[in-house]
Amino acid sequence: MLCEVRRAANSNKIIKQANEYLVLAVLLKNDPLSVEEIVTLSRLSRPTVLNILKELDARGLIYRAGLGESMGGRQPIMYTLNLRRYFAVGIDLEYPPVRVAFSDLREKVLYSQEWDCLPGETMEEVEENLVSAIREGMRRLNIATENLIGVGLGIPGRVDIARNLAVRIDRMDHIWQGGDIAAQLSMKLGVPVTVRNDIHLLAAAERTVQPALPKNFLYVARRVGIGMAVFLNGKSYEGGFGNSGYLGHTVLDPEGPVCRCGQRGCLECYATTGAVETNYARGAESPADYDTIVSRAQEGETLAQAVLGDAGVKLAMAVVNAMLLYDIQTVIIEDCVDDGTFFAIVRENIEKLLGPSSDFQPRVLRGKLTGKTFALGGCSMIVKNFFKAPQLKVDG
């Protein structure tokens, strides 16, 4: 009997919380709104809405934004979200570049900072610099710790989302010895830190920057490595552990060059900037960096064009396979390392590989993220989790 009473009490609490989140979500999309408008959009009863508004007002989550237009009677009180109450932080740990961003509850970037980790920095120093950057953002925005709803950390590597753990952080093996970076940052900052794959968070940021994107799309980012995120029905498909879309380590040639992951012939052996530099050096009189190779290709140099062209074909092959596998026709290419030259090569080859006779019509878009918004994905994840209503579990 006591268990049934407790279960009923917990159920009522969850229902109340779910109704609160529903009202917040309605205000997020449509504010300012009157009580009657909230009742109509939320489909909750008027007494329920009034009670919720009273509680949200007391907690500083909403405020009265004046009077609305009269429909024949008194002018209604209009309610809106208090965007100065709670904030989210995003971290993009690309390494060596590192970026931090602050956003409000509408995922608008309010402050951002970017720097490169220095050679010889320890993991403890990387973490301390992150903490210092976040505290500097809090100081500039006049934000107290209790006003931060969380930190979203994107790492280049593998994660275990069930345990909120970084399993491997690519390119940081020499300084990262398997510690719990999310827990360490959380302890130092005094706020929850949630870790995810960096490409998944970049895709979330892209969806915020481009709200007109379809519900189903692929997001492919070429940074130091190559990764992919999959959006299905408007939600990120993370896979069993949070590592779906590990495109850079799909094998194109089992007899190909050895990849840093230990396999042979991975996509990253052909299509990253480092791979382009390596493959160019094999045929050139002297090595050249990636920007120089791109410039030489634009000037008509045969070797540079051939190396970039081969890299573009390889990436296009991998992307087309993913598009066909998921039955998704829209793909966003986030080429973070040049002026769009490589993107044009990849798009041309995607369209060529699918062919004009195919009923599969590709839509290849270039990403619109900038240095200011690369860390926005972490903010976006935190904000969306904040507005996610609790789920009532039904036995049986």
Image (cartoon, grey):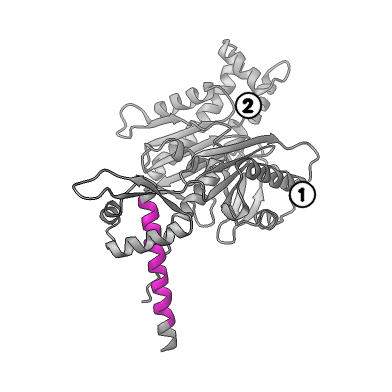
Could you tell me which secondary element the residue under label 2 belongs to? helix
Separation of marks 1 and 2 at Cα, in angstroms? 33 Å
Of 214 and 245, which appears nearest the observer?
Answer: 214
Label 2: which residue? 276
Q: Quadrant of the N terminus?
A: bottom left
* Neighbours of disc 2 within 10 Å: few (<14), some (14-19), many (20+): many
Relative to 14, does residue 129 appear above or below in the rendering? above
Relative to 32, does residue 393 appear above or below in the rendering? below
Residue 284 visible, this orientation? yes
State the image coordinates of residue 394 (x, y, percent, origin top left): 37, 73
If you read the primary sequence from the N terminus, does the residue marked by circle 1 or circle 2 appear first? Answer: 1
**At 65% from the left edge and 35% from the top edge, which residue is drawn?**
114
Residue placed furthest toward the bottom: 1
Q: How many marks?
A: 2
Answer left or right for 44 relative to 211: left
**At 72% from the left edge and 48% from the top edge, which residue is drawn?**
127
**At 66% from the left edge and 58% from the top edge, which residue is drawn?**
183
Q: Amino acid at mark 2?
A: Val
Label 1: which residue? 124
**At 44% from the left edge and 85% from the top edge, which residue is drawn?**
3
State the image coordinates of residue 201 (x, y, percent, origin top left): 53, 44
Of 283 and 225, which appears nearest the observer?
Answer: 225
Residue range corresponding to the magenta coloring: 6-26
